Image (cartoon, helix red, strand yellow):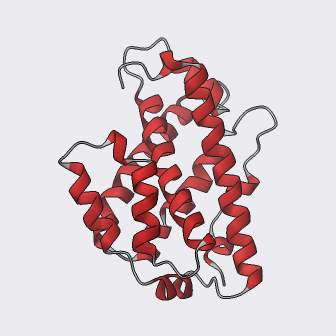
Amino acid sequence: MAYFNTIKRSFADVDLSNGIDTNEFLEATEGMVKIFDVIGSTAFGFVQNDMNGNIKRLRLRYESNPEKNDTLEHLLEGESDESKRLATEGLLWLIRALDFTAKGLTRSLDNPDEELTYSFSVAYETTLRQYHNFLVRPVFALAVKSCPYRQDFYKRIDIIDDTAIGLMREWLAALDILVNRVQILFHQHPEYIKGM
């Protein structure tokens, strides 16, 4: 069974009708983070831990008042006047990591002769690198170099036919929509992330 059939919620199933549903977004993201288990590289452990920590920040904020924090938009607005905006900072870094993952996997699908190492290296250069200092960059480079061979990875997530590839593309397209919406939100409200 394809990996994308085993997760609790797909990004394609996140309700966007009144904003980005916070709980559904978190459920989909929790499922996505588990793909690093499938990649199998211990070097990606710090990425996975960072993402899980940011999910925890958002979940704590959401659970403190589920009605008030029902959408990511409401959550960010509600936290905007506070001196410590832990959930906002968590979302900022989580979106950056999701963008990296989406771009790496999309590039891999679009370039079937390319190894994951190269796909994720290019994705890193265009997403996260600009936010990392000289101490983090080599750690990330090491993680990317330890990606499994393309063939092994796709076998592990059971993406072996056109139906499964279609499912993965749908999942990635929905993730890309979510990432773009949050990035636009941050762009429209720079005060949310001022000083971060």
- Residue furthest right in the image: 17
Q: In this image, 190 relative to 134: left or right? A: right
Q: Is residue 182 left or right of residue 97?
A: right
Residue 196 coordinates in the image, percent (x, y)? 36, 26
Residue 187 spot, x, y in % from top left: 57, 25
Query: Residue drawn 64% across and 53% down?
Result: 175
Q: Is residue 193 above or below residue 22?
A: above
User: Residue at point 61% right, 85% down?
Assistant: 158
Instruction: Please name whichever residue, 172 or 23, is drawn nearer the observer in this view of the structure.
Output: 172
Q: Nearer the viewer, residue 109 or 3?
A: 109
Residue 28 position, x and y percent, is: 62, 55
Q: Do we see residue 111 in this rendering?
A: yes
**Which x, y percent locates residue 73?**
64, 27
Tell me if residue 148 comes above or below residue 168 in the rendering: below
Q: Quadrant of residue 18?
A: top right
Quadrant assignment for the N terminus: bottom right
Horizontal side, residue 173 vs residue 106: left or right: right
How many numbered badges does the structure rendering display? 0
* Of residues 44 and 6, the one drawn nearer to the viewer in this rendering: 44
Q: Is residue 1 above or below residue 134?
A: below
Residue at the image point whose x is 51% and y is 43% from the top: 95
- Res. 52 visible in picture: no
Viewer-side residue, 145 vs 67: 145
* Furthest-top residue in this view: 81
